[in-house]
Image (tube, rainbow, N blue to C red):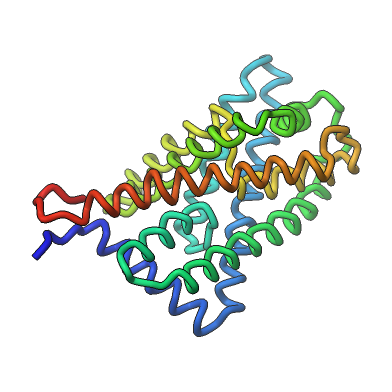
Amino acid sequence: MNPVSALFEKIDSSIIKKVDLIESSYIRYALRAILACLFLTLGTAVAFGTAMQAEEVAAGSGKFIYAFMFSWSLVMILYMNAELGTSNMLYMTVGVYRKKINLKIATKILFTCILFNLIGGILFGYLISLTGTFQDLSADNYMFTSLIAKLEKSTVQILVEGIFANIVVNTAVLVSLRMKDDAGKVLAIIFIIFIFAFLGYEHVIANFPAFSLGYFASNGAMGTMTVTNLVHNIVFALLGNYIGGGLVIGLVYAWLNNTKSDYVD
């Protein structure tokens, strides 16, 4: 008998809960996916808001402030039991590999989650664009220039950054599963997510509210925010995220723990 991995017992349990929820109440599952982007939009908004203020005080400081404040997004998502597409890339890949679910239900969960993350990102991005912080912004503010830079990246850059972004996100998810102390868990999540946020890597779900907020706050005036550029970013960030979270972290660690050795997670 193979040794039991405590970490993968928790992952298996989470997978079964996701299947049970979407099969028993599709609407409730969809709402949890929408709520993920409520928290993600709030984290994005406060990150951009504080970064814009920081840049006015000390040029170049915005990037540090943005990365730290954005990191709280995943804390809210994990503690509020919302459904995030990029972490489900890991869960669904692991579930299929470990034969806990079939490919059909895994695809259904992942597609539903990403679709309703997108709906939530657009909805809450629009609503937050109506708030005071995002009124009458200058064309050269930190948020607009950051989003323009995202949309100008090459295919290879988006793909590679997407891989690393979801390696980081799913490392934070797995670390949080292994920790029992809430204070330590929160700190671990914040400092791990800081890595991808500071480095500006591409996270497809985070880009949903970011692009939506930028579009609505600029009244559609961002020249590089075309349908072509948006689709280009989203498609290759999505692909990179799946490689990083689903394959590099999910599949590799599932395989590492499918062993007769006592060296399991």
How many labels were placed on the picture? Answer: 0
Image position of 114 with respect to 182: above or below: below
Residue 24 location in percent, x, y? 50, 84
Quadrant of the image for the N terminus? Answer: bottom left
Image position of 132 with respect to 33: above or below: above
Q: Residue at left 75%, top 43%?
A: 230
Res 54 quadrant in image: top right
Res 118 quadrant in image: bottom right
Image position of 222 with respect to 208: above or below: above
Residue 83 location in percent, x, y? 52, 62
Q: Residue at left 59%, top 48%?
A: 238
Please state which of residues 75 and 206 is positioned toward the viewer in this rendering. Answer: 206
Res 31 quadrant in image: bottom right
Left or right: 215 as drawn, with respect to 16: right
Left or right: 257 as drawn, with respect to 237: left
Which residue sits furthest bottom?
24
Please state which of residues 47 and 170 is positioned toward the viewer in this rendering. Answer: 170
Residue 154 location in percent, x, y? 67, 29
Image position of 3 with respect to 24: above or below: above
Left or right: 146 as drawn, with respect to 84: right
Q: Residue at left 61%, top 46%?
A: 204
Residue 32 location in percent, x, y? 56, 67
Left or right: 244 as drawn, with respect to 119: left
Q: Residue at left 60%, top 31%?
A: 156
